[in-house]
Amino acid sequence: MLDTTTSDTAAPSEERRGCLFALSQPPLMIFLAVIGCLLLMASLHDLLLL
């Protein structure tokens, strides 16, 4: 008899993690905060001092 208890289309054991999981990582958030602060400082310099 054919064994049908296991199939190739079974759900993966680990669920997929999306973009929100990636954004919750501290190194990425620190990197994005530094880039954002540099852009903010450059734009304020252009607007207020030049």
Image: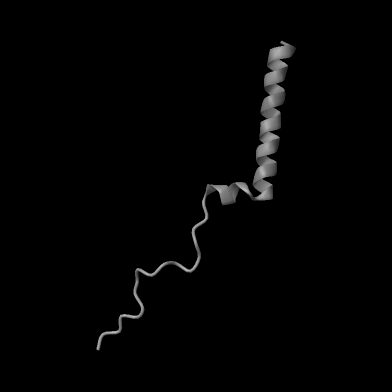
How many numbered marks have been drawn onto this rendered protein structure? Answer: 0
**Quarter the N terminus occupies:** bottom left
From the viewer's perspective, tell me whether residue 43 is left or right of residue 19: right
Q: Position of residue 7 (x, y in %)?
A: 34, 74
Residue at point 66% right, 43% down? Answer: 29
Residue at point 67% right, 41% down? Answer: 31
Q: Quadrant of residue 6?
A: bottom left
Q: Is residue 17 above or below residue 11?
A: above
Colour pattern of the rendering: one colour
Q: Is residue 4 above or below residue 28?
A: below
From the viewer's perspective, tell me whether residue 33 is left or right of residue 3: right
Q: Nearer the viewer, residue 28 or 20?
A: 20
- The residue positioned farthest toward the left in the image shown: 1
Q: Position of residue 36 (x, y in %)?
A: 67, 32
- The residue positioned farthest toward the front in the image shown: 5
Q: Nearer the viewer, residue 20 or 34?
A: 20
**Quarter the C terminus occupies:** top right
- The residue positioned farthest toward the bottom in the image shown: 1
Q: Nearer the viewer, residue 49 or 10?
A: 10
Residue at point 30% right, 80% down? Answer: 4
Residue at point 72% right, 18% down? Answer: 45
Q: Quadrant of residue 5?
A: bottom left
- The residue positioned farthest toward the right in the image shown: 49
Q: Position of residue 46 (x, y in %)?
A: 69, 15
